[in-house]
Amino acid sequence: MIKCFEHVGMVAADMDRSIAFYRDLLGLRLHLRKTMENGTEVAFLDTGGGMLEIFTPPAVLRLPLNSLPTRRAFCISPFL
């Protein structure tokens, strides 16, 4: 049984616009934003019950957005 979600990951083309949308329009709280060694930007926004994880790869690594995977992680109960 799924009890909650831990985080959901997605890829965005523009990190600043994505953060502004989820923070300013939907009220999520920016928990962490950093740039990884390979240039990928990562941000975690707190939904109040899980995290939204946004990735923006560097321009040299970008593929069409519809070809990139999303990620989901759930909290589950070991007993049904």
Image (cartoon, rainbow, N blue to C red):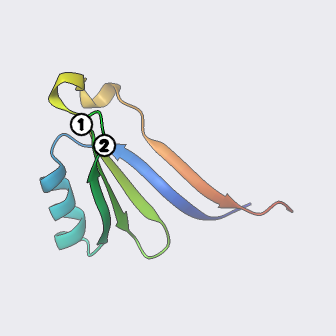
Residue under the image location 24 percent in, 43 percent down: 12
Quadrant of the image containing the C terminus: bottom right
Identify the mark at residue 25; answer none if there is no mark.
Answer: none
Secondary structure at badge 1 equals: loop
From this view, report whether residue 58 is shown above or below residue 2: above
**Residue drawn at (13%, 55%), measured in percent from left and top?**
16
Q: Is residue 57 left or right of residue 7?
A: left
In the image, farthest residue toward the front: 37
Circle 2: residue type: Met
Residue at coordinates 27% horizontally, 53% vertically from top-left? 34
Residue at x 13% of width, y 54% of height: 17
Depicted 66 relative to depicted 51: above or below: above
Q: Which residue is mark 2?
A: 36
Q: Which mark is residue 39?
A: 1
Q: Give the answer, above or below, for where 10 lies relative to 3.
A: above
Q: Residue furthest right?
A: 79
Q: Position of residue 36 (x, y in %)?
A: 31, 43
The Cα–Cα distance between marks 2 and 1, rounded to whole angstroms, is 5 Å
Q: Is residue 51 left or right of residue 37?
A: right
Q: Are marks 2 and 1 in contact (CB under 8 Å)?
A: yes
